Amino acid sequence: MIARYIRTFESADPAWFYLHAFCQVSAYAIGVAGWGTGLKLGSESPGITYSTHRNIGIALFVLATVQIFALFIRPKKDHKYRFYWKVYHHSFGYAILVLGIINVFKGINILKPEDKWKTAYMIVIIALGGISLLLEAITWVVVLKRKSRKSTKPYDGYNNGQI
């Protein structure tokens, strides 16, 4: 959400990038701890297999690890491969987000805690989704206003289209 919505504000550059990187590296560390916990619990539970949850967890670990490399292989803004890097970075980021949400639900169903825990998780996800929708609308307003301010007048025969 930081990269998507704070980056829009020119005054937030480059702070949004460092905040985004910090949050993502922190999330990766928490994810690796969760993955390690899953490996430990799995090794201590012979004969009990939750293959879907495990496979999604492995996929998340791989995608997140590749995503972390994005920090080190990011081309400069004007590099010819920057477009392709952005496609990879955004695609992996959204895939991790969706798979992470699904896998938490899988984990909740495995543990079978009181209903309040699943309800609390759903409330958090719905709230974040609502905040994202609101920020998306605000972002579009900001971007459209910025574009209308930067639009140039057509050539008028006197100043070659310059304002």
Image (cartoon, grey):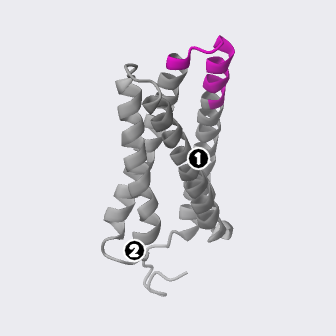
Q: Is residue 73 left or right of residue 32?
A: left
Q: Give the x, y percent position of residue 64.
A: 44, 50
Q: Give the x, y percent position of residue 160.
A: 44, 86
Q: Is residue 65 above or below residue 57?
A: below
Q: Give the x, y percent position of residue 69.
A: 42, 63
Which residue is denoted by mark 2 in the rendering?
75
Q: Is residue 162 above or below residue 52?
A: below
Residue visible at 41% across and 42% down in the picture: 60
Which residue is denoted by mark 1 in the rendering?
30
Amino acid type at circle 2 is Pro
Q: What residue span does the magenta drawing correspond to?
A: 110-124
Q: Is residue 91 left or right of residue 146?
A: left
Q: Is residue 149 visible?
A: yes
Report which quarter residue 118 is drawn in.
top right
**Magenta-drawn stretch contains 117:** yes
Instruction: Judge the density around disc 1: few (<14), some (14-19), many (≥20) Cα neighbours within 10 Å.
Output: few
